C-alpha cells in the first residue's frame, strides 16, 4: 500500500499485529515460566495503552504523535511507565529492550518499529510520511457520495411508498433497535473489544506456533465457527500432543500439507490431490496421532506430484480454451484434477469456436476470463457470476466447456468490467472512511453486494448532524468495521470488529 493512501489507523493496526504476534508468550514455549509471564504482561499492557485517549486522537488526525502524552502516564511509576520485553532474532538469540508506555504516541511507535527492524521482522514507512498529505481524491469522491446519498433517499422514498401498500410493520420496533448504530455504540464497552482482540491474538499466535513446530503450509480452523479463545485452546492441545508424541510421527516436516480443522467426517482425513490433512476437534489425542501418522514421505511426494500436475494441466487448459480455471468452494480437489484431465485430453483449438462477430473474437483475444469449477451437483449448467467469471460444473465435458466459453465470453467480460469498477469504488470509499473516522480495517460479508456496501459506508461519511458524526467517530475510531447483509443486527464480532447491517439506522 502506498504511503499516501495509508491512514494512521491502518498503520497502527499493521504495526500492532506484527509486534504482538512476536512478543506473544506462545513463541516462548521452550523458555522459563517467568519469561512467559513477562511477555504476557507486555501484551496486556500494550493493548490497554493503545485504547487511551492520546492514541484515539492520533488516529483521528487531531494531533501529532509527539505533542501529546497519555493522561494516565503522569501517575505511573518508573517501573510501570516502561516495561521490558524480548524479541527473537532469526538466529535464535533474543533482543531485550524497554517499551516506553508512559511516553508519547511517537515514542512508543518509534520504539516498536525500530525493534522490529533490528530483528528483520517487519518494515513500515516512517511516521513522518503519514502526516504529509491526506487523500488525493477527496474532491472527486464527494460527487460519488452525493450520488450515493441521492440513491439512498430514493430507496427510502420507495420504502415509504411500499409501507402504504398494506405491509405489516408490527415487528419494526425491535428491528429498528437492533439496527440503531448510535445506540449500539453508546452501550459498547471498550474492554470487551480488547478482550476479543487479545483472544484473536492468542489464536493467531498458537496457529503460528503449530505451523512452526509441524511445518504445515497453513493452519485453518475457521470452518468450525468457534470463538478465538476456544480455537487457541484447541491449538495448544495439538502442541501438547507434539511435545508428547513427536517421536512417533513418520515425518519431521509436514510441508506442503495444509492443516484443516473440520467437523466433516464424509471426506478422507488425508487429501493427496489437495494437500490437506483434516482433523476433527472431537477426536482424542491418540486419534489425532493416528491421523498425523497417515503422513509419510511417500504421501508428501504424492502431494508434490499432484500439485505440479494440476498447475501444468491448468496452464494447458488455459492455452486450449483461453480460460483461467480455478477450483470452486464446492468442488473437491480430486474432482477438479479429473476435470482438468478430461478437458485436456482432447485437442481443442481456439479456431473451433463458432463466433458470430468481431466483438466475440476481440473478447477472446483479451486477458483470459476466469472459469470457476464447482461440484457437478451445485452447477449443472454454465452461468456468469456476479464477479464476471464463468461457473462450470466438474462433470462437464469438452464440448460443454467450449460452448460455454463461446456463449458467455461477451457477457462475462462486461460483467467483469462492471465488477472491477465497483471494487475500485469500494476501495475509494474504504480509504475515505479510514482517513476521516480512523477505522483500522473495513470488510464485508460475501453476501453483501458492492453497491450496497458503498451506500452503507457513504451514509456514515455523509452524516448531517455534527453530534451524530462525532458519536460515530468516537465509537468507530481505532476499531475494525464489518458490513453484514440486511436482516442482521449491530453486534461485536469474535475478532473485536464492529459489525453493522447495510440498512443500519
Image (cartoon, grey):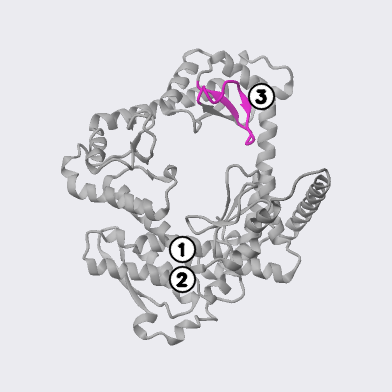
Q: Which residue is mark 1?
A: 15
First in sequence, mark 3 or 1: give its number: 1
Q: Nearer the viewer, residue 318 or 84?
A: 84
- Which quarter of the figure is the N terminus placed in? bottom right
Measured as percent of width and height from the top left, residue 334 is found at 41, 25
Q: Is residue 167 above or below residue 323?
A: below
- Seen from this angle, which residue lies furthest front? 170
Q: Nearer the viewer, residue 81 or 469?
A: 469
Picture residue at 47% right of the left edge, 55% below the top? 494
Q: Which residue is mark 3?
A: 408
Q: Is residue 147 visible?
A: yes
Measured as percent of width and height from the top left, residue 197 is found at 45, 61
The quarter of the picture where residue 37 lies is: bottom left
Res. 246 mark: none
Tell me the element at label 1: helix
The residue carrying pointer 2 sits among few (fewer than 14), some (14 to 19) or many (20 or more) residues within 10 Å by Cα, namely many
- Seen from this angle, which residue lies furthest left? 247
Picture residue at 33% right of the left edge, 49% below the top? 234
Q: Would you say residue 385 sits in the magenta stretch?
A: yes
Q: Is residue 120 visible?
A: no
Callout 1–callout 2 Cβ contact below 8 Å: yes
Count up the numbered dots.
3
Q: Which residue is mark 2?
A: 109
Rounded to the nearest whole Å, what is the CA distance between mark 1 and mark 2? 8 Å
Q: Main secondary structure of the magenta part?
A: loop
Picture residue at 39% right of the left edge, 31% below the top? 274
The residue carrying pointer 3 sits among few (fewer than 14), some (14 to 19) or many (20 or more) residues within 10 Å by Cα, namely some
Measured as percent of width and height from the top left, residue 467 is found at 71, 71
- Which quarter of the figure is the C terminus placed in? bottom right
Tell me which segment is drawn in magenta.
Answer: 375-394
Rounded to the nearest whole Å, what is the CA distance between mark 2 and mark 3? 52 Å
Amino acid at each position: 500500500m502506498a504511503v499516501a493512501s495509508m491512514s494512521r489507523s491502518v498503520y497502527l493496526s499493521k504495526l500492532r499485529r506484527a509486534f504482538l504476534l512476536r512478543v506473544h508468550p506462545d513463541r516462548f514455549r521452550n523458555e522459563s515460566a517467568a519469561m512467559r509471564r513477562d511477555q504476557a504482561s507486555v501484551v496486556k499492557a500494550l493493548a490497554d495503552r493503545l485504547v487511551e485517549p492520546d492514541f484515539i486522537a492520533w488516529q483521528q488526525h487531531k494531533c501529532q504523535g509527539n505533542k501529546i502524552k497519555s493522561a494516565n502516564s503522569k501517575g505511573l511509576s518508573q517501573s510501570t511507565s516502561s516495561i521490558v520485553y524480548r524479541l527473537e532474532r532469526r538466529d535464535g538469540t533474543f533482543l531485550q529492550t524497554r517499551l516506553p508506555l508512559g511516553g508519547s504516541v511517537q515514542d512508543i511507535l518509534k520504539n516498536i518499529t525500530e525493534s522490529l527492524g533490528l530483528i528483520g521482522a517487519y518494515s513500515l514507512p516512517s511516521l513522518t510520511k503519514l502526516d504529509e498529505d491526506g487523500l488525493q481524491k477527496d474532491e472527486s469522491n464527494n460527487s460519488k457520495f452525493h450520488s450515493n446519498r441521492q440513491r439512498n433517499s430514493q430507496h427510502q422514498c420507495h420504502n415509504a411508498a411500499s409501507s402504504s401498500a398494506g405491509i405489516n410493520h408490527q415487528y419494526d420496533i425491535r428491528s429498528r433497535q437492533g439496527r440503531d448504530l448510535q445506540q449500539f455504540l453508546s452501550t459498547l464497552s471498550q474492554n470487551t473489544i480488547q478482550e476479543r482482540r487479545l483472544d484473536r491474538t492468542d489464536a493467531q499466535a498458537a496457529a503460528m506456533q503449530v505451523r512452526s513446530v509441524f511445518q504445515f503450509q497453513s493452519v485453518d480452523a475457521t470452518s468450525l465457527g468457534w470463538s478465538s479463545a476456544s480455537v487457541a485452546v484447541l491449538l495448544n492441545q495439538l502442541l501438547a500432543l507434539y511435545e508428547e508424541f513427536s517421536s512417533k510421527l513418520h515425518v519431521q516436516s509436514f510441508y506442503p500439507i495444509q492443516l484443516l480443522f473440520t467437523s466433516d467426517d464424509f471426506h478422507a482425513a488425508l487429501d493427496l490431490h489437495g494437500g490437506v490433512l483434516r482433523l476433527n476437534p472431537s477426536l482424542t489425542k491418540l486419534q489425532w496421532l493416528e491421523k498425523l501418522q497417515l503422513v509419510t514421505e511417500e504421501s508428501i511426494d504424492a502431494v508434490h506430484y499432484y500439485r505440479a500436475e494440476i498447475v501444468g494441466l491448468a496452464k494447458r487448459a488455459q492455452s486450449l480454451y483461453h480460460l483461467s480455471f480455478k477450483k470452486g468452494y464446492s468442488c473437491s480437489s480430486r474432482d477438479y484434477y479429473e476435470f482438468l484431465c478430461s478437458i485436456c485430453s482432447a485437442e481443442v483449438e481456439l479456431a473451433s469456436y463458432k463466433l458470430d462477430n468481431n466483438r466475440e473474437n476481440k473478447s477472446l483475444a483479451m486477458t483470459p476470463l476466469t472459469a470457476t469449477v464447482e461440484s457437478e451437483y451445485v452447477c449443472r449448467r454454465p452461468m456468469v457470476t456476479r464477479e464476471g467469471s464463468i461457473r462450470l460444473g466438474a462433470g462437464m465435458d469438452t464440448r460443454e466447456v467450449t460452448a460455454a466459453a463461446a456463449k458467455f465470453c461477451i457477457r462475462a467480460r462486461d460483467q467483469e468490467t462492471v465488477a472491477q469498477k465497483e471494487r475500485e469504488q469500494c476501495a475509494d470509499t474504504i480509504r475515505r472512511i479510514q482517513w476521516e473516522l480512523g477505522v483500522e480495517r473495513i470488510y464485508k460479508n460475501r453476501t453483501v453486494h458492492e453497491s450496497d456496501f458503498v451506500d452503507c459506508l457513504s451514509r456514515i461519511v455523509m452524516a448531517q448532524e455534527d453530534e451524530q458524526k462525532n458519536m460515530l467517530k468516537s465509537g468507530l475510531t481505532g476499531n475494525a468495521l464489518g458490513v453484514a447483509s440486511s436482516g442482521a443486527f449491530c453486534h461485536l464480532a469474535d475478532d473485536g470488529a464492529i459489525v453493522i447491517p447495510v440498512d443500519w439506522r
